[in-house]
Structure formats: C-alpha cells, structure tokens
Image (spheres, grey):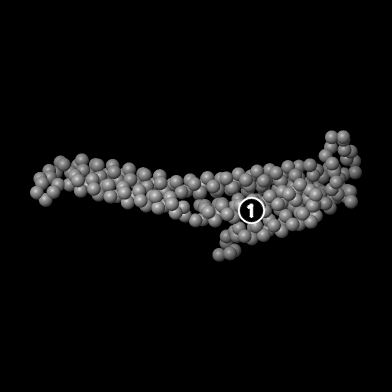
Amino acid sequence: MPYRTLSPERIIETAERLAERIEDRFPQAGLAKVGGELVKLARDINADIGTIDRPIIWLRATIGMIVLAGSAAFLWLVAAVLPGPGDVFAKQDIIPVVEAGINIAVLLGAGLFALVAIEERLKRKRAFGGLHGIRSLIHVIDMHQLTKDPITLTADFTPTGKSPRRVLGKAEMLRYLDYCSEMIAVTGKLAALYAQALNDVFVVEAVNDIENLGSNLSRKVWQKIALISGGRTKDRA
C-alpha cells in the first residue's frame, strides 16, 4: 500500500531535488557536494534494500541439502538399530534407541536453526554497513552548519583574524540552515528503509539511534533559525 510504506524511489527523487536546489542557490559551497553524496547514498541504499528483500538462494539451497542429508542419516540410523522380522527386541533395548533418536533430533534442530540464522545475520551485517554510512553523512552535514552562527549577523559582532570567513547574509543563512535540516530529515527516512525491509530488533534499534541523532542535530539547526528569524540579527546582503 503506497501510503503505508516508504518508497525508496520517492526518497531518491526528494534527495535529487534537494541537491539541485542547493546547487542552484549555493553552487560554490561544500554543502552542494554533500547534497550530491546524499543522492549517491540514497541510490546505494536502494540497491541494498533490494538485496535484503530477496532470499539468499544459495544459502537456502545449502540448508535444504543439509536437512535432507541429516534426515536420511537419521532414518538410516533408526533402520540400523531396529530389530529385523526374526530378531528378538527386549523392552529395555528401546530406551537407548529412543535416547539416541532424541539426541540426533535435537542436534539436527539446533543445526538447522543456526543455518537459518546465518541468512538473517548476513542481511543484518549489510544493513549495519548502510546505517554506518548514513550516520557518517549526518555528522558531515552537522560540520557544514557548525560555523553558521547567528551571532555573526548581530550588529555588535566583531570577527577576529582567526574567525571563519563569513559570506552569508541573513536570508542566505536561513536557506543554508533550512537545507541542512532537510538533508538530515532525508537521512532519517533512508535509515527507516532498513527497518522497513528487515524486521530485526538490532536493526530497528540502530535505526532509532540514527533518527535520535538526526533529531538532536536538527533541533540545533532550528534553534539557529529561530534566533535569526527573531529579529536580533541583521542582513549582510
């Protein structure tokens, strides 16, 4: 259902449009290059999601062959220990047979569970790799907004010789910070794609951590926007 699930294609379109807007307004800024990286990351994650959604055929085939081989070995063992038509089978002889059968069944079940869990671990590892890239990009976005300080727009601000170069006026800084907030929001949706594709508690926790990180950093950005919009600053333009 289109309105109950996130669409990777729509998120890519949003990232592309955002990167184009940043490029149009700030063509020489490093934030434009970060926007391009966001688009590349969105495309990579879309490919990742497609891989995670598909079953690992070779692994499942291997598990199937192992199950068949184990079942055949179990049946052969049962047939080997059971008495023939003319053999005498005492009641006390059935206890070792039952115990051996239970032990083999338990071992086969544990082995099957471990093999099935391999697919989940492989997909989880792939998801963690993508989430690590998202987390790194969020910090890169935060670094770009770090020096965009509203105090530099106040009338009594005096830069020092070591102060960063200030070229943005009030309106431009507002747009710059707003773009940063939008980019952080897109990274949160990219992270949510992994939780949507893989119902794994560890992946969901990692996605929640990334969303909390993005929310905290976005809150700092909007605090700056509120200060600039509050009338305490001046426009350099």
Q: Residue furthest front?
A: 58
Q: Residues within 10 Å of mark 1 (few under 14, many from 20)?
A: many
Q: Please tell me in which quadrant of the rendered image residue 43 appears.
A: bottom right
Q: Say what secondary structure mark 1 lies in.
A: helix
Q: Nearer the viewer, residue 232 or 172?
A: 172
**Picture coordinates of residue 118 (x, y %)?**
45, 46
Q: Residue at x 68, y 56 (%)?
A: 15
Q: Nearer the viewer, residue 158 or 167?
A: 167
Q: Residue beneath label 1, please?
A: 42
Left or right: where 44 falls relative to 67: right
Q: Residue furthest top?
A: 161
> Does residue 142 appear in the picture of this structure?
yes
Q: Residue at x 69, y 57 (%)?
A: 16
**Picture coordinates of residue 233 (x, y %)?**
86, 47
Q: Please tell me in which quadrant of the rendered image residue 160 appears.
A: top right
Given the image, on which type of amino acid does mark 1 rest? Ala
> Does residue 193 appear in the picture of this structure?
no
**Picture coordinates of residue 145 (x, y %)?**
76, 45
Q: Nearer the viewer, residue 215 or 26?
A: 26
Left or right: where 145 falls relative to 169: left
Q: Nearer the viewer, residue 58 or 85?
A: 58
Specify the quadrant that holds the N terminus. Answer: bottom right
Q: Residue at x 10, y 45 (%)?
A: 88
**Picture coordinates of residue 84 (x, y %)?**
13, 48
Left or right: where 83 falls relative to 199: left
Left or right: where 168 falls relative to 111: right
Q: Residue at x 88, y 40 (%)?
A: 157
